[in-house]
Structures are given as C-alpha cells and as structure tokens.
Image: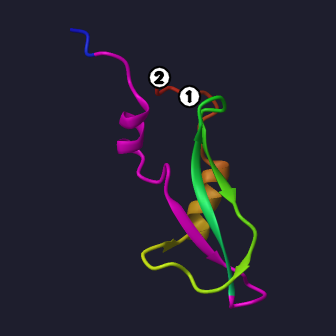
C-alpha cells in the first residue's frame, strides 16, 4: 500500500531540534550571548547550526541553552547520504 512521500513536517516531528533556537553564553564576557538556529539543509542532507554574533543583554525567556555535546554531535555525527526522502 502506498502512503505518499515523506514531507518536511514528518522530518521535523521526528527530529525536534530542527527549527529550534538555542543560546550560548560568551565565555569571555558573562553579559553577552548569541543565538544558534538549527536549520535543515536539504542539499547537504544534514542539520546546520547558524550562529549569530554575540550581543550584550539578557537571554529571552523560554530559550534553552545549547549543550556543548549537542553542538559537537551536530557537526560530527551526521550521515553523509540522506536516507530520509
């Protein structure tokens, strides 16, 4: 039986970090932070973190801090061939 093709919404529901924004504190200045947006690149077949510049201020309410192990896993442990679509 044919159920149709996989969609981006399917992938987003399986991988919850796609489209999510995290923050990271500046290790040199505790008053600064930057945001990290997790974007899916369909041409590369992987999630790519997009970093902003450091800004001075307080972190917005409800935003999670990016764990260093999450960032290292995203940059090193993704498949080279996408098998989703």
Outermost residue, left side: 1
Query: Quadrant of the rendered structure where residue 30 is?
Result: bottom right
**Is residue 17 highlighted in magenta?**
yes
Look at 70% across and 61% down and name the residue there. Answer: 51
The picture places residue 28, in percent across and down from the top left corner, at 78, 87
Q: Nearer the viewer, residue 32 or 14?
A: 32
- Relative to 67, is 52 on the left or the right? right
Outermost residue, right side: 28
Label 2, on which residue?
85
Compared with 14, 4 (above or below) is above
The picture places residue 23, in percent across and down from the top left corner, at 58, 72
The magenta region covers 4-31
**Is residue 20 highlighted in magenta?**
yes
Image quarter in which the N terminus is found: top left
Q: How many marks?
A: 2
Q: CA distance from mark 1 to mark 2?
A: 7 Å
Q: Nearer the viewer, residue 12 or 55?
A: 55
Label 1 SS:
loop
Look at 65% across and 28% down and name the residue there. Answer: 43
Q: How is the image coloured?
A: rainbow
Other-residue count near label 1 (Cα within 10 Å), few / some / many at <14 / 14–19 / ≥20: few
Other-residue count near label 2 (Cα within 10 Å), few / some / many at <14 / 14–19 / ≥20: few
- Relative to 18, is 37 on the left or the right? right
Disc 1 vs disc 2: Cβ atoms closer than 8 Å? yes
Compared with 75, 46 (above or below) is above
The picture places residue 18, in percent across and down from the top left corner, at 49, 49
Label 1, on which residue?
82
Q: Nearer the viewer, residue 17 or 81?
A: 17
Label 2 SS:
loop
Look at 47% across and 54% down and name the residue there. Answer: 17
Query: Quadrant of the rendered structure where residue 41 is?
Result: top right
Q: Nearer the viewer, residue 76 or 27?
A: 27
């Amino acid at each position: 039986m044919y159920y149709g093709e996989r969609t981006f919404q399917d992938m987003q529901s399986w991988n919850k970090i796609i489209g999510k924004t995290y923050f990271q504190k500046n290790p040199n200045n505790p008053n600064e932070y930057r945001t990290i947006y997790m974007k899916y690149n369909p041409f590369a077949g992987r999630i790519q973190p997009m970093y902003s510049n450091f800004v001075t201020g307080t972190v917005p309410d409800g935003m999670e801090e990016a764990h260093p192990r999450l960032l290292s896993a995203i940059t090193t442990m993704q498949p080279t061939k996408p098998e989703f679509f």
